[in-house]
Amino acid sequence: MMENKENEYPKFSVLMTVYGEEKAKNLDSALESIENQSVIPNEIVLVEDGTLGNELENIIKKHRNNFTNNFKIVKLIRNSGRGIASGAGIAFISNNWIARVDSDDISKRDRFKLQLKAILQDPSLTMIGGQIQEFLNDDTCDIVGKRTVPLKYEEIREYAKYRSPINNPSIMFRKDVLHDIGGYPRLNVMEDYDLCVKFISKGFKIINLPEVLVDMRVDQGLYSRRGGIKYLLQYITMKIQWKKLGVGDTKSVLLSIIFMTCNTVFPTWLRKIIYRKILHRYNT
């Protein structure tokens, strides 16, 4: 049964973007996981990033009717990418705390409860993430990976020199801080990494919880998409910019670029082994 904690926890909104290629059943599961939370959000803001098909529209209509609190829909004329779509949605959010939820992931039942408790324990927090598990074939029991990120701010700042220290589908952050960092990143890739770096560069406190907060859906094409020259060039550009912001040094930038270059030229089968056996290793 859902807990009635309306007066105990800070008010918060969920931000989700969805585009036309998303599967209706995935969006259905993602929204259902929000509705089944032990502490539900005061508001859901869903951005339709371009034209959606009838199946997706019907899923959205169903959940808009089911959700007991405010459910806002923001429609973009054309597909603009997650960074721009997220920024458009943020303009319609009423609460200061924003929880990111991806349109094909499943939030654990106590995800928001755990994050809100952390806020009450430390009001200086500006971003709270957690651990994620990766599952395959629509089966949340078929775990193929886990992305473990550091917990404490000092560890997060050091880790950010090399890799993104947050799991974007798990984060909850403060809306008012966006004004100080120049707004939500408008990037199509690495916008989560960029957001985190800008929080760190301004000295805003970030933590990650030790618990798995989100089951992240992956497919067989995941490892083939993690690479490419275009991505590599964007990565190099961002690494140099982040160093100028004080997150990273010459050593970390060079090592990161070397690793990402190797990741780009590796065949998919080798990249898959590296992610599953090293980077996102899951210990049963």
Image: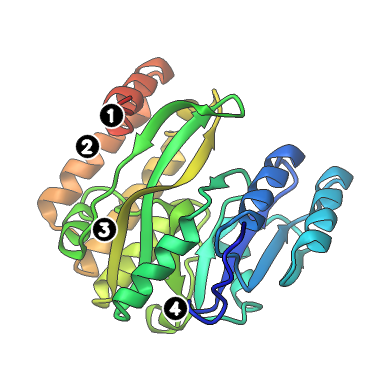
Residue for badge 4: 178
Residue for badge 1: 262
Q: Dot 3: few (<14), some (14–19), or many (≥20) neighbours within 10 Å?
A: some
Q: Where is residue 149 in the image (x, y as percent from the top left)?
A: 28, 48
In the image, taking residue 157 as reference, residue 107 lies left or right, namely right
User: Distance from label 3 to label 2 (Cα)?
Assistant: 14 Å
Q: Dot 1: few (<14), some (14–19), or many (≥20) neighbours within 10 Å?
A: some
Give the mark nearer the N terminus: 4 vs 2: 4
Name which residue type carries label 1: Cys
Q: Do the residues labelled 2 and 1 touch (CB within 8 Å)?
A: yes
Q: Do the residues labelled 3 and 4 touch (CB within 8 Å)?
A: no
Residue for badge 3: 240
Q: Which of 9 and 263 is in front in this view?
A: 9
User: Distance from label 4 to label 2 (Cα)?
Assistant: 32 Å
Q: Position of residue 220 (x, y in %)?
A: 54, 23
In what element is the residue under mark 3? helix
